[in-house]
Image: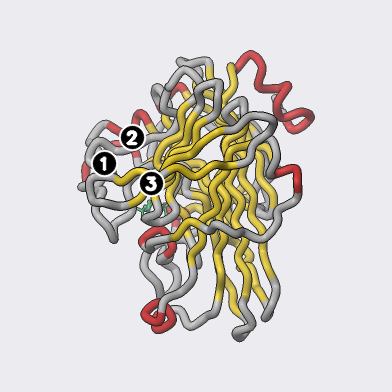
Amino acid sequence: MGHSASVWDQRSEFEVSKDWNGVDQVVLRVPRGASARVSLHGGQVISWRNERGEELLFTSSKAIFKPPKAMRGGIPICFPQFGNCGSLEQHGFARNKMWIIDDSPPHLPSSDGNDKVSVDLLLKPSEDDMKCWPHHFEFRLRVSLSMVGDLTMISRIRNINGKPFSFSFAYHTYFSVSDISEVRIEGLETLDYLDNLQQRERLTEQGDAITFESEVDRVYLGSPNAIAVLDHEKKRTFVIRKEGLPDVVVWNPWEKKSKSMVDLGDDEYKQMLCVDAAAIERAINLKPGEEWNGRLELSAVPSTRYSDHIGGHVRY
Ligand code: TA6
């Protein structure tokens, strides 16, 4: 079944196919060759490829592609809770629910509509969901691919005239990296962070780019809206731009925890890094009728050019 999507001066198609569990997936393609694949299970981006067909997101070779478990990799959506510090399952239920394609989404500002191929997904609570989280919400997710292969995700979460509610949120992004010991993050220097390995103690990052020699599980607070993840071996930089998402989660399980995870290969920690645009420290509160937007834009650029892409935010 083909859906035509209006794009900047070229007709592009996205198709809906089914995975081996019979779950619908939407494939976005642009003429220059980049693509993205979104599963209706969890509204999870499970693949993002550049115009050479290189996969930019990590997927575990031991991923369990069986609902209700979220696949280990891609970009799971953490809502309405990040982590396990609330009454819900770890990272909330949104990534374990079936979403639908929204054929008549409310208008988005034109900057996010005309030069991209997009799909709009919708999650609304079922009667069952209301038992564990009794709030009337609509979660609209637009996943877009630009003509040059940048991936954009826009979450619009609205309180549909129920009682006020609060939530935390993250785009739990698994980047594919060549070797974690050859990766650094720029843009988080000198920020405070909550260290999940030390009972969420609040600490301050030192003044240099972040590199990796052991397990890291941190929530950086009040971060700039442009962050760079530099993969030295591939000479590739992921540029993360965000709006409405003040925090950044950085997670690599390293060797010991990888060995304890059934859906992650023992050595796969070397090829992945989670850098999640998030809203965690301060919960988002919505009164009836209010809506929150959280926007993420990912680019993968040659490292020689990445400073052009994040302007003055670069720190040396
Ligand atoms: O900080 C990221 C984190 O909360 C880690 O503690 C680790 O649990 C990771 O998320 C993966 O969570 P998941 O539920 O996807 O296994």
* N-term-proximal mark, 2 vs 1: 1
Q: Quadrant of residue 1?
A: top left
Q: Residue at x 70, y 22 (%)?
A: 307
Closer to the camera in the image, 163 or 4: 4
Residue 89 drawn at (x, y percent): 36, 68
For label 2, the SS is helix
Residue 151 drawn at (x, y percent): 57, 37
Colour treatment of the image: secondary structure
Mark 3 packing: few (<14 Cα in 10 Å), some, or many (20+)?
Answer: many
Q: CA distance from mark 1 to mark 3?
A: 23 Å
Query: In the rendered image, which residue does mark 1 sit on?
Result: 264
Residue 274 drawn at (x, y percent): 46, 41
For label 3, the SS is strand
For label 1, the SS is loop
Q: CA distance from mark 2 to mark 3?
A: 27 Å
Q: Are marks 2 and 1 in contact (CB under 8 Å)?
A: yes
Judged left or right of residue 111, residue 257 is left
Closer to the camera in the image, 212 or 171: 171
Q: Residue at x 68, y 38 (%)?
A: 226
Query: In the rendered image, which residue does mark 2 sit on?
Result: 269
Give the label, 1 or 3, closer to the camera.
Answer: 3
Query: In the rendered image, which residue does mark 3 sit on?
Result: 25
Q: Amino acid type of disc 1?
A: Leu
Q: Are marks 1 and 3 in contact (CB under 8 Å)?
A: no
Mark 2 packing: few (<14 Cα in 10 Å), some, or many (20+)?
Answer: many
Give the label, 2 or 3, closer to the camera.
Answer: 3
Q: Amino acid type of disc 3?
A: Gln
Closer to the camera in the image, 260 or 302: 302
Q: Amino acid type of disc 2?
A: Tyr
